[in-house]
Image (spheres, grey):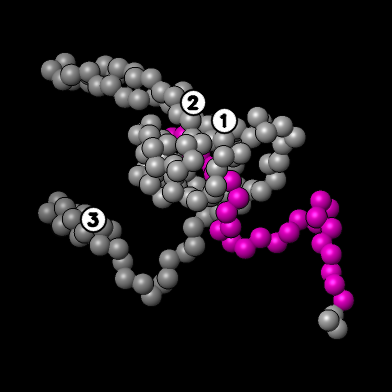
Amino acid sequence: MTKKTVTAQYPEVQPHLPPRSRGVIGLLEENCTVCMLCARECPDWCIYIDSHKETLPAVDPNARARTRNVLDRFAIDFSLCMYCGICIEVCPFDALFWSPEFEYAETDILELTHERDKLREWMWTVPAPPALDPGAEEPKEIAAARKAADKLAAAAGGDPA
């Protein structure tokens, strides 16, 4: 009660957000395989995904042609979203991330459904993950890959370093 109150003049002065704060969801399209896990697990059903199958020709003449899903539409209705983060957690290919952007208000509720181009723009505002602890143990996967690479280099007669 003895301190003077300080009012932040919001539009002119941007607030200082803590690192890794949740704002909106950003989409990295290259990683999306249209597995639909995010849409199925969303408790609000606010993720809309459309895709089509594309046939890729076989590389080898004796092989079959491959089919893959191609993303046509990826949209999130932020008027329904409750920002629980389940979609980000269940994505096995790291296509969804939290962006600290929070200024996406609209005058019409129908405009709160953001398509993949807007979600892609927010992807570039996602901060880098925190650095690993220098004293931490190396992950088992990386240690196994390094051991295999060293073994191959030794068998080839090369220097592993």
Amino acid marked by disc 3:
Ala
Of labels 1 and 2, earlier in sequence is 2
User: Residue at left 76%, top 56%?
Assistant: 14
Of labels 3 and 1, earlier in sequence is 1
Which part of the image, by quadrant, shows the N terminus? bottom right
Which residue is denoted by mark 2 in the rendering?
73
Name the spot of residue 47 as percent of width and height, x first.
49, 35
Badge 3 crowding class, 10 Å Cα cut-off, few under 14, some 14 to 19, many 20 or more, is: few
Name the spot of residue 15 as percent of width and height, x first.
73, 59
Amino acid marked by disc 1:
Glu
Badge 1 crowding class, 10 Å Cα cut-off, few under 14, some 14 to 19, many 20 or more, is: some
Secondary element type, mark 3: helix
Q: CA distance from mark 3 to mark 2?
A: 37 Å
Secondary element type, mark 2: strand
Of labels 3 and 2, earlier in sequence is 2
Left or right: 128 as drawn, with respect to 52 = right
Which residue is denoted by mark 1 in the rendering?
115
Badge 2 crowding class, 10 Å Cα cut-off, few under 14, some 14 to 19, many 20 or more, is: some
Name the spot of residue 29 as percent of width and height, x first.
47, 34
Which residue is denoted by mark 3 in the rendering?
145
Looking at the magenta stretch, what is its main secondary structure? loop
User: Residue at left 84%, top 58%?
Assistant: 9
Magenta residues, start to end: 4-30
Q: Nearer the viewer, residue 10 or 157?
A: 10
Nearer mark to the viewer, of 3 and 1: 1
Quadrant of res 71: top left
